[in-house]
Image (spheres, rainbow, N blue to C red):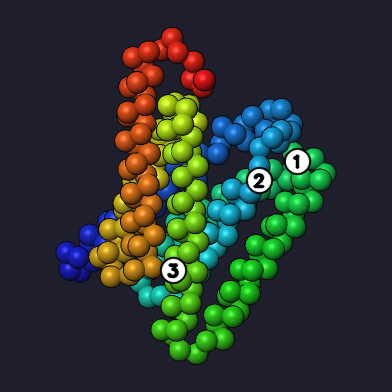
Amino acid sequence: MSPCEVSKDAAGVAGNIFAFGLFLSPIPTFRRIIRNGSTEMFSGLPYIYSLMNCLICLWYGTPLISPDNLLVTSVNSIGAAFQLLYIVLFLMHAQNGKKVRMLGLLLAVLGIFAFVVVGSLQIADSNNRRMLVGFLSCASLISMFASPLFIINLVIRTKSVEFMPFYLSLSTFLMSASFFLYGFLSDDAFIYVPNGIGTLLGLIQLVLYCHYNRSSSKDSRQPLIL
């Protein structure tokens, strides 16, 4: 194997490892849900969106769509399994109205994914098939990485990092940076473009955390939210 291939595989393996930080981050939330026997005011939408993202990116990584991207398939297979587990736990503890909505959204996601799989397989030309699924996975990843913009705005507005966990931001940055390098070495724009955006947003979160965490520690008598 060439040094480039070794570096690409190493970046992909690192991305798989760092992704566990993201996949495990909802555990404190679900401990509270299970302990209280209720989903309270928590929303199940993030897990629905994450499942859709994982399924589409998983499909892009398969040999039927793009060659030599099994590390993309592996990380998204694990991610999809985690999201399904979280959705099942959410459904078990949700009230009836919220449970029906979540079931409807879950069925919609699975239906859309089945449509994407069957529809893409109807495209005989492998390059056109890869372009279609690649654009869908790229759009899905960008929308997922754009979601922290709300948290970034909240941190700047409140001058507090209370609602931006450090290890979640660090995991996002490290995973995105690893897959940016993986995609760059693979010359795959559908991987390195969205993960480049994710790397930038993750870096912004870390900078904000360092800045506002230091400010909070200097004046700990001030309330976190005014």
Q: Which residue is at a point 64% across and 29% down the rendered structure image?
A: 32
Residue 109 in sight in this render? yes
Residue located 70% across and 57% down the image: 105
| Label 1 close to label 3 by CB (< 8 Å) | no
Instruction: Say which mark, if any, is on residue 61.
Output: 3
On-image quarter of the N terminus: bottom left
Q: Looking at the picture, which amino acid does disc 3 mark?
A: Gly
State which tag comes first along the sequence, 1 or 3: 3
Quadrant of res 122? bottom right
Q: Position of residue 201 (x, y in %)?
A: 37, 47
Q: Which residue is mark 2?
A: 44
What residue would you read off at disc 1? Answer: 94
Using the image, determine if residue 77 lies above or below residue 119.
above
Disc 2 to disc 1, how far (Cα)? 9 Å
Horizontal arrangement in the rendering, residue 95 relative to residue 210 (left or right): right
Work out whether residue 195 or residue 152 is closer to the camera in this orientation and state it. 152
**Rendered location of residue 216, percent (x, y):** 39, 19
- Cα separation between marks 3 and 2: 26 Å
Please determine whether, in this image, residue 203 is positioned above or below residue 60: above
Residue type at numbered disc 2: Gly
User: Which is more toward the observer, 21 or 187?
Assistant: 187
The secondary structure type at the circle numbered 2 is loop
Helix, strand or loop at mark 1: loop
Label located before the other in sequence (2 or 1): 2
Contact flag, marks 2 and 1 (Cβ < 8 Å): yes
Residue pictured at 35% horizontal, 21% vertical: 215
Which residue extends farthest top?
Answer: 221
First reached walking from the N terminus: tag 3 or tag 2: 2
Residue located at (35% from left, 62% from top)? 193
Residue at the extreme right of the image, as rendered: 96
